[in-house]
Amino acid sequence: MKSLFVKYKSVIKFILTFLLVYVLCTVLYKFYLQYSDGSKFYPDYMTNLVAKQSESLLNSLGYEAKVLPHPNEPSMKLMLNGNYLARIIEGCNAVSVIILFFSFVIAFSGKLKITLLYIFSGSVLIYVVNLFRIVILSLGLYHYPEKSEVLHTVIFPAIIYGMVFLLWIFWVNRFSKFNKKDG
């Protein structure tokens, strides 16, 4: 049994580190959500910010976009050219995806400065791609409402999670201390 722990020490360390960081960040994020009363930024600051930035991007593309607090649930209603198109909910703000990305990079950490820079730049990239994902999804829903199920449940999650996967692969192969190319 001890030989198995020795043999798989790095795998066990990765799993435990990933789980610890992921659970800790998720609990902190849940506290943030729990204590966001929505009085200033409804339903919470991050979701509100993503909704407002999505609105601005859609407006810059020549559409008449408007986001409004949903009266019956903690979300923002996205109106496009006067039509209620979709809800922007907490799950649309990319924070959970960034937590997943962050946890993986920490679990496969490299040199401190590079790790922090990669986490920051990767998180910004995830956030920006998520904004464009919402804008493109909104336009897809507006122009092709019959494709809403495949757009929302297959294509656009594949884009965001596919990008995170590629960021992870790049991290492990280029910067992680577990990269074997040096030894």
Image (cartoon, rainbow, N blue to C red):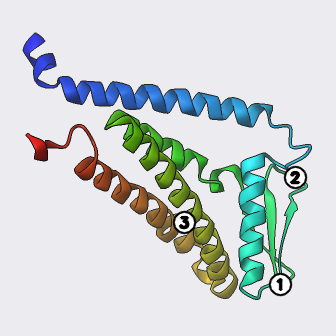
The tag on residue 72 is 2
Of marks 1 and 3, the one in the foreground: 3
Q: Secondary structure at mark 2?
A: loop
Which mark's residue is nearer the viewer, 2 or 3?
A: 3
For disc 3, the marked residue is: 129
Disc on the earlier residue, 1 or 3 = 1
> Considering the numbered disc 1 on the image, is that residue within a helix, a strand or a loop?
loop
Residue 81 tag number: 1
The amino acid beneath tag 3 is Val
Q: Position of residue 172 (x, y in %)?
A: 27, 47
Query: Which mark sits nearer the N-terminus, 1 or 2?
Result: 2
Residue lying at 15% horizontally and 25% vertically, measured from the top left = 8
Residue at 63% across / 29% down in the picture? 28
Of the two numbered discs 1 and 2 in the rendering, the one whose residue sits closer to the viewer: 1
Q: Quick check: 51 above or below 46?
A: below
> Is 98 located above or below residue 152 in the figure?
above
